[in-house]
Amino acid sequence: MTQRSLVLLKPDAVRRGLVGEIVGRIERKADWRITALELRTLDRETLEQHYAEHVGKVFYEPLVTFMSSGPVVALVVEGERVIEGIRVLAGPTDPITAAPGSIRGDLGTITRENLIHASDSEESANRELKIFFPNLA
Ligand code: CMP
C-alpha cells in the first residue's frame, strides 16, 4: 500500500545539525522516496492549523514557541506503508521511553524537543500535506 506522509524535522533537529542523520535514516528504507523537501520557518497561523487537535492543551503554547523558534525541514515521503513506518522509525513521543535504534530513542531526551513530526494516519497525512504543500499533485 503506497502512501504519503508529511514529516517535519523540528527546530531542535536543525539547530543540532541532525538533518542529514535523520533524512539518511528515511532515505535508507528500501523504495521510500522523498518527493519534496524544504527549509522553512513556521508562523503561528500555520502551527495552529497543524496542531489544531492540541490547541488549549497545557503544552500547546510552549510547543508553538518551540516550533517557531527556528527553521524546520518539511518533507513529503512516499512509499510502502510509510505512515506507520516513519512513526516506527521516530519512536514514541517521549524520547526517554523510545527504544534505542529509533530516531527519538537514539538522539532525544526532551518530550517537547523530540526532533521529528510524522503524520499518524492517512486522514492526518492528507490534512497536513494540504497545509504544508498545497500545490502537490
Ligand atoms: P508530536 O507527537 O510530533 O506532536 C505533538 C507534540 O507536542 C509532540 O510531538 C511534542 O513535541 C509536544 N508534546 C506532546 N506532549 C507533550 C508534553 N506532555 N509536554 C511537552 N510537549 C509535549
Image (tube, rainbow, N blue to C red):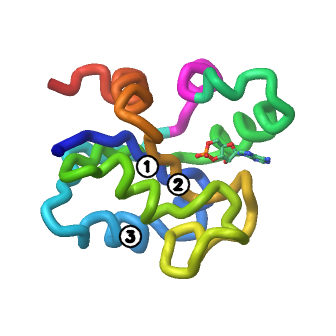
In what element is the residue under mark 1? strand
Q: Which residues are magenta?
A: 41-50
Q: Amino acid at mark 2?
A: Ile
Question: What residue is shown with label 3?
Answer: 20
Locate residue 44: give its quadrant: top right
Helix, strand, or loop for circle 3? helix
The residue lying at 17 percent from left, 44 percent from top is 2
Q: Does residue 65 appear left or right of residue 12 in this picture?
A: right
State yes or no: Cβ of the residue under disc 2 lies below 8 Å from any atom of ligand 1.
yes
Task: Check if residue 9 falls in the magenta segment.
Answer: no
Does residue 111 appear to the left or right of 72 in the view shown? right
Q: Which residue is mark 2?
A: 116
Q: Where's residue 8, x and y in %?
A: 46, 47
Q: Residues within 10 Å of mark 2 (few under 14, many from 20)?
A: many
Q: Position of residue 117 (x, y in %)?
A: 51, 48
Residue 80 visible to an observer of this rendering = yes
Q: Residues within 10 Å of mark 3 (few under 14, many from 20)?
A: few
Which residue is identified by label 1?
A: 73
Q: Is residue 125 shown above or below 16?
A: above
User: In the image, what residue type sits under mark 1?
Assistant: Val
Q: Is residue 45 magenta?
A: yes
Q: Residues within 10 Å of mark 1 (few under 14, many from 20)?
A: some
Quadrant of the frame with the N terminus: top left
Query: How much space separates mark 1 and mark 3, taking CA atoms?
Result: 11 Å
- At label 3, the amino acid type is Gly
